[in-house]
Amino acid sequence: MQGVDPSVPPSGTGCADCDAASPQGWWFHLRRCAECGHIGCCDSSPGQHASAHAAGTGHRVARSFEPGEEWFWDYGEEVLYESGPELAGPQHRPLNQTAPGPAERVPADWAQRLHQ
């Protein structure tokens, strides 16, 4: 699969852009850039950082960073792949990290703030 570097570990355990923001943001689900390991939030999240990363860098392929999900998404072709190459670990966010998360940053009305 083009645009995938299996040797690169994820950039962290949460959305790098939400974590770097001031004030810090929150996310619904996480996506991992399969080329550089950048962790960004999904398009349902307020920040939509994973797709912004793909658009800004040209890194088209992302993998879910959610437990139990192994699918890849090609932002350029808008194609879903049910599986792909094994990437450097960890394969998903920590199991004790909530979704949405992180718990201490999620507003009470979070469901109304999601992008559809």
Image (tube, rainbow, N blue to C red):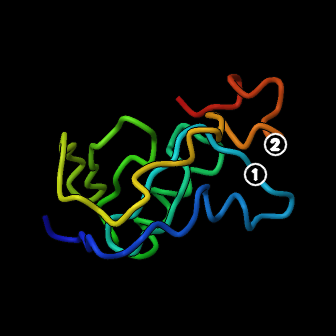
**What is the quadrant of residue 54 in the picture?**
bottom left
Q: Earlier in the sequence, mark 1 or mark 2?
A: 1
The circle drawn on residue 25 is 1
- The amino acid pointed to by label 2 is Arg
Say which of 56 and 7 sits in front.
7
Q: Position of residue 23 (x, y in %)?
A: 86, 58
**What is the quadrant of residue 5 in the picture?**
bottom left
Q: Position of residue 22 (x, y in %)?
A: 85, 64
Q: Quadrant of the N terminus?
A: bottom left
At x 27%, y 43%, the residue is 71
Q: Position of residue 105 (x, y in %)?
A: 81, 42
Say which of 37 and 67 sits in front.
67
Name above or below for residue 16 compared with residue 83: below
Mark 2 lies on residue: 105
- The amino acid pointed to by label 1 is Gly
Say which of 12 and 74 sits in front.
12
Number of residue marks: 2
**What is the quadrant of residue 44 in the picture?**
top right
**Circle 1 crowding by C-alpha within 10 Å: few under 14, some 14–19, many from 20:** many
| Badge 2 element | helix
Nearest to viewer (mark 1 / mark 2):
2
| Badge 1 element | loop
Q: Are marks 1 and 2 in contact (CB under 8 Å)?
A: yes
At x 77%, y 64%, the residue is 21
